[in-house]
Amino acid sequence: MKTKIQRPVKNECDKQIETRSRSHALDFVAAAAQILTIMCIVKGNPAWKGSLSLLFFGGAAALVYKYDEHKEKTYFIIGIVLGIIGTALLI
């Protein structure tokens, strides 16, 4: 029977790798949402508003995270504005 090797705790390198992977995943989702938005606009489908709102929500989440890390109010304010724009597109 094979025993699974367990790591005791995450070190700084593991945390950086996890952060980079989340960043790359967000970039991929943003690119897919942009392509979906363009396709919907070209085909005349009203779903473009929903996919565009996802881009605004993603930007808002990224800026709120930066605010949490750097404590600069500008990040938070712009993040809130992007969130409001995303919400307005859904209404």
Image (cartoon, helix red, strand yellow):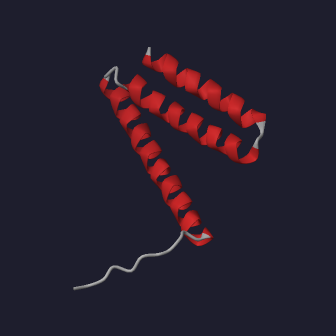
Question: What quarter of the picture does the N terminus occupy?
Answer: bottom left
Q: Residue at x 70, y 28 (%)?
A: 77
State whether residue 8 is above or below residue 58.
Answer: below
Q: Residue at x 42, y 76 (%)?
A: 6
Q: Measuring from the top left, give residue 37's x and y in whole percent.
A: 40, 32
Q: Measuring from the top left, give residue 46's x and y in whole percent.
A: 34, 20
**Residue 73 occupies quadrant:** top right
Q: Is residue 69 left or right of residue 26?
A: right
Which residue, as the protein is rendered here, is positioned at the far top?
91
| Nearer to me, 60 or 41 | 60
| Nearer to me, 16 or 42 | 16
Q: Measuring from the top left, give residue 48's x and y in whole percent.
A: 39, 26
**Residue 78 occupies quadrant:** top right
Q: Residue at x 30, y 26 (%)?
A: 43
**Residue 16 occupies quadrant:** bottom right
| Nearer to me, 43 or 62 | 62
| Nearer to me, 9 or 25 | 9
Q: Is residue 7 left or right of residue 36?
A: right
Count the marks: 0
Q: Measuring from the top left, give residue 39's x and y in whole percent.
A: 34, 33
State whether residue 15 is above or below residue 36.
Answer: below
Q: Residue at x 48, y 48 (%)?
A: 26
